[in-house]
Image: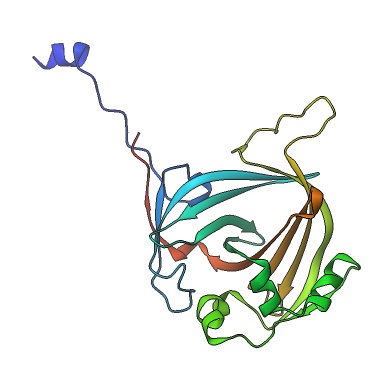
Amino acid sequence: MGFFNSIFGKKAPPARELNHPSALQIGDMISIDNSFALPPQLRGQQLKVEAINTYEFERSQHCEWVLKGHGNDTLFLSIEQDDEAYLAFSIKISRAQVEQIFDLDQFSTLFDEQGAQLNTLALSPQLAEQLEQWLGANYHQVTFALFGYFHREDYRGLKPPQDDHGATGEPFEYYSLLDDEERRAVEVEVYEGGETDVVLTLYRPLSDIRDYWPAKA
């Protein structure tokens, strides 16, 4: 009987192993540590990968995972590689929130000159509850007007396609600042037509992801 089963029976495919954020695919889920060092949008949350994007620069490509949990917040995850790998969690903020967090005259200097400085204003209680753990007190600029393309596709290990003019994706200019501890960042993407995305980024150890659940095939 075992002989016939080996010929005609269908073996279940091996379960996909998932133990590192770099291998995340759409539909996978992760659970985040319940540490009070984390902001409420992350602390103890179970997050699902809803989409995967690619940022393309002249000499590099970066993968971005779009995450959703039980709340209304959309979160973004990338991997920052220095001497070791770190998680980079990001959250997008609105123009109204930018106006409450930073002095707009000071904020505008990010686009005029390299080496701009940025200080965080005193936050209202409601805004502090939402965003205080995402923010540093003082920031210094580390990237100025870096040109790149944004793709709403996963191009890990692949070169994004180009059109007849050599362009690919949505072109944008990238600006970034780090806080004094280099644990938090403000990142700004300026697209054609002036559309601007401002995100707050928090760098955390890989161990903040406590569990991985691969999507069912």
Is residue 205 rendered to the left or right of residue 136?
left
Left or right: 118 as drawn, with respect to 93 = right
**Residue in front for this viewpoint, 90 or 79:** 90
Q: Could you tell me residue 50's position as x and y percent? A: 47, 46
Q: Position of residue 8 (x, y in %)?
A: 20, 12
Up/down of 123 relative to 66, above or below: below
Where is 165 relative to 1, above or below? below
Image quadrant in which you'd find residue 179: bottom right
The quadrant in which the N terminus is found is top left
Horizontal and vertical percent for residue 211?
A: 37, 57
Question: Quadrant of the image for the C terminus?
Answer: top left
In the displayed structure, would residue 96 be above or below residue 174?
Answer: below
Residue farthest to the right, as pictured: 113
In the image, 174 versus 206, the foreground residue is 174
Q: Residue at x 46, y 48 (%)?
A: 49
Q: Specify how the rendered protein is coloured.
A: rainbow
Residue 136: name its quadrant.
bottom right
| Between 29 and 87, the one nearer to me in the picture | 29
